[in-house]
Each structure stands twice: as structure tokens, then as C-alpha cells.
Image (spheres, rainbow, N blue to C red):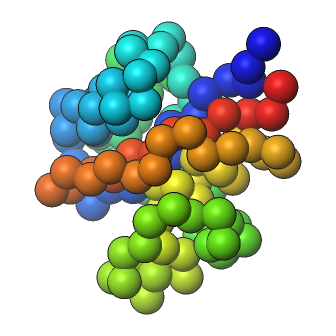
Amino acid sequence: MTGRLVAGIGLRPGTGAAEILACLEAALAQAGLGAEAGPRLATLASRVGEPGMVEAAASRAAELVAIPDEALKGFEASCATRSTRIASLYGVGSVAEAAALAAAGPGGTLVQARIATARVTCALAREAS
């Protein structure tokens, strides 16, 4: 049995739920997971209250996990992709990948590297079994 799926989400302020959900669906499809029910959604603590993020989580009946900015830095070595702009802001190459791994907990594994749209990034990780 595999552990529960976690979707790490990076987003710009003011991003709507439809954009977030479209990026999530694209990440699930790219990973060959289809519309897996109820993955946990993880994002920066500073973004967890964004209306679009709250609406996206509610529409999927997904738990929304806030990851403190400083907690991301511990996952730099585990990130598969790197954005220079994000690294300068948060000290990690990918908010989405680091948030997914942080929420997946010890032994969590990245199953889909970050994919990006204009305003959203999404990466997928699995909790350890």
C-alpha cells in the first residue's frame, strides 16, 4: 500500500481556484495518477489563506497544510527543479516541491517534479507507507 498523496502548491497572490486546480490536474495527469481523490494540499504559510487556495482545497475536500517558509530550506537538496527567483526569495529552488516533501513527512518521496503555469506551480509527493 502506498502512502497518501500530497500536492505542493506555489502560487502568486490573487491566483484563482480554477488556475490552481488546473495545475493540480495537470500534475496528476503527468504523473499518471488521474484525479486521485483528496490529496493533501501544502503551500507556504503566507499563502494558505489566499482565497483561491482555500476555495481549491474546499472544492476537492482536501486538507490544506501550511508550511512555514523556514521549513522549506531543509528540502533544497531534494528538489528536482530550481527557480533562481524562488531560491532568492525562499532559499529553496522550488516552493511546490519543498512544500510537498515537507507535508509528506519523514521518508516522503517526490513522485512528480514541479510543473508550472503562469501563476501556479505544483509538485506531488507521497507519504512513506
Query: Residue lying furthest left in this view?
Result: 118
Query: Residue lying furthest bottom in this view?
Result: 88
In this rendering, is residue 122 above or below 98? above
Q: Position of residue 128 (x, y in %)?
A: 80, 33
Q: Position of residue 94 (x, y in %)?
A: 46, 65
Q: Position of residue 2 (x, y in %)?
A: 73, 20
Q: Is residue 16 in sight in this rendering? A: yes
- Residue that appears at 32% across and 49% down: 115
Q: Is residue 89 in sight in this rendering? A: no
Q: Where, quadrant-wise, is the C terminus in this rendering?
A: top right
- Residue that appears at 27% across and 53% down: 116
In this rendering, is residue 83 above or below 1? below
Location of residue 57 by image quarter? top left
Q: Position of residue 52 (x, y in %)?
A: 29, 39
Q: Where, quadrant-wise, is the N terminus in this rendering?
A: top right
Q: How many marks?
A: 0
Location of residue 65 by image quarter? top right
In this rendering, is residue 15 above or below 124? below
Q: Is residue 36 left or right of residue 69?
A: left
Location of residue 28 by image quarter? top left
In this rendering, is residue 107 above or below 29? below
- Residue that appears at 20% across and 51% down: 117
- Residue that appears at 48% across and 14% down: 36
